[in-house]
Amino acid sequence: MHLSSKKNLTNYSVVFNSLIVSFLLIAFLPTLITIILGINFLYSTVNQIDMSHKRMLNDIRREVERSIKDAMNLSSRNANNPLIISYASADERDYFTEYIIRKQLANSMVGYNTISQCYLYLPQFQIVITNVNVLEAKTFYNNNYGIDFEDWKKKVESTNTKVKVLRIPNIKETNDAYIINSHVSFNSRTDLPVTAFSELNYNTLYKNIGEILDNIDGKIMIYNDSGILIDNIGNEKNTWLKSIEENPGNKIISIDNKKFKVFKTYSDIGYFEVLLAIPINYIYDAVAVVGKYILATLIACIVITLFLSFRLARKNYRPIHNICTLLCSEMSAIADNEYDAITQTIQKHMSNADSWKKIFNKNITSFQEMYLEKLLLGKIPFRESILDSCRLYNINFAHKYFMVILFELTEESLLFEDDKFNDQEQHELTKMILKNIVAEMIMTLGTTYIMEVSGKVVAVCNISDKDYCDIEKNLSILIEKTQEFVKENFYINFYTILSKIYLGVDKLPDAYREVIKRANEKEDSEKRVVQESVHPECIEQCIAFIKENYADNNLSISFIATELGLNTSYLSRFFKQQTGIGLLEYLHHYRFSVAKELLEKQPDLVLKDIARQTGFYNVAALIRVFKKIEGQTPGQYREDYLRQSIEKSIS
């Protein structure tokens, strides 16, 4: 880029392009993280879907196990019924006993909603006692089951000691029946066992399983070594069983060109296996929805990244463009890009670095005060930048504890009156004296910076660990000595407000707000006291007291207030509000009037005696006040008065 012409400074320069590349590289990492998180989320989604299907599978297994347990418990209870055990070994029928057994069977079914009926098969009598009636075995078979009688007898007469869940065609219902048997005993007259049966309610069990599936287009099959017990497969049972046998370890099977993901579990209670097959398309559809959202999010991230990279590049390039535009008038050579131009300009001005450094060091105190003022007022937004800025301005905060001290001047601080200064100048002069003296006195305790903040004299103290415990005591002693010193030598009165000790330089704004709040509370409290204690009669008392004690050169506002039992801070202000003149000014005017009278009536009286009799500290103070009020010195006034008196007597 040629810097000799402003037209060549475009937004598509070497620097601008490098900024775009930089921002794109910076954005590449979060985009890559987004892609990784998206892939991980998809994988997690598939796992969550699988976990939900596994939970569904286990819920189905538990539901069937619960029903089988109920049937087992019922069969076992009936098999262990003493009356049934006794009747199982009987050689002759007893109709009354059969009636009692039927009633007991009916009562035993109470509370079992998944069991449709229970009955007792007695092979020695070839009868079946149900919870409803007593029938011959063949009649019971004809009324209930749709298989050959001999097949039914073989099933119910099985001597298998394990829990046996039998699926038998049911002619009364649209679905098959499931019976669970429990042997009672072998009759003495036959080798066939007396067996108690519980028949599960297929519709109820199938409904419960359907609720667990929750409208999912899945295939469920529950089977054992006797065949399929429950399924929703329809006429494809053999195809499914064959596919499962051919692919025992596969999680994916294909039925009629349709793929299913298979989940299986085995029941140790009912000795059956549960198979749940979910269409692959269903899983893919669920993942596809999530994938679309992730893809949309990724595209949005890329678009936003490109947009923000371009905008940020333009924004960050604009200051460089403006600098280079300004440098065009100074650069005589041609630079390849903006960085070269800036480098050349910096090298050109490096020769002046020493002079700038001297200027900075010369005004370092002012810079320190300005920065600390901003810090106390809470105008430094970033905590991390505070210590760096302190090092830049050579502010040495080596310890972790901080305290802020507020020095507040009282009305009596304006003790010096000079015709060279107005009230504001006298106040500023007083604050400057106070700052210098306080700085020298308090510096003995460690690192302390004195400054003015919003017109108030404030000290920032950095406290070491060894001084932490005794700092308040030592400060109180030192401040008391300082107050005595400035009052005795400069007639300045002030009071102090100390903050609590804070941990960390970033807490200085809190410390400053604390002392300001306490100062305002003190001022409000004193105002209330003034309103309660100071009244118009106090003016007459002050004037009378001044007239009686004006010759005392120690007479001050605080002395008058103490003697009259009034508030020091607001007495002069109230006096001026009522009379139009300050109390200290009134004292000087009264002393001036007495001194003027002595000059007129006692011409031989020297100025030293007049100053002593009127309460001035010395002759210089008398001359200063006299000249300010009268416009001339006491000696000039005496000469003029004597000359006028002689001229008046001659005429």
Image: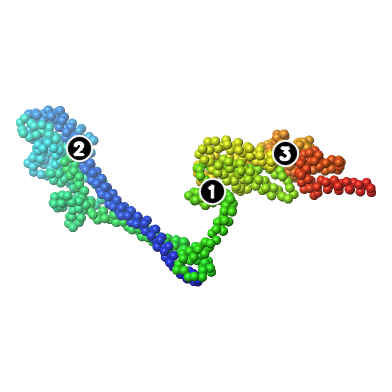
In percent of width and height, residue 146 lies at 12, 44
Which is in the foreground here, disc 3 or disc 2? 3
The residue singled out by tag 2 in the image is 69
Three-letter code for the amino acid on which mark 2 is drawn:
Lys
Q: Residue at horizontal 20%, vertical 33%?
A: 108
Three-letter code for the amino acid on which mark 3 is drawn:
Ser
* Disc 1: CA contacts within 10 A as few (<14), some (14-19) or many (>=20): many
Q: Is residue 190 left or right of residue 604?
A: left
Residue 15 - label: none
In percent of width and height, residue 40 lies at 30, 53
Which residue occupies the foreground of this view, 200 or 582?
A: 582
Which one is earlier in the sequence, the residue at label 3 or at label 2? 2
Q: How is the image coloured?
A: rainbow
The residue singled out by tag 1 in the image is 395
Which residue occupies the foreground of this view, 261 or 494?
A: 494
Which one is earlier in the sequence, the residue at label 2 or at label 1? 2
Q: Residue at horizontal 58%, vertical 50%?
A: 365
- Which SS class for mark 1? loop
The residue singled out by tag 3 in the image is 556
Three-letter code for the amino acid on which mark 1 is drawn:
Ile
Evaluate whether residue 358 shows in this view: yes
Which is in the foreground here, disc 2 or disc 1? 1
Q: CA distance from mark 3 to mark 1?
A: 40 Å
> What is the count of numbered marks?
3
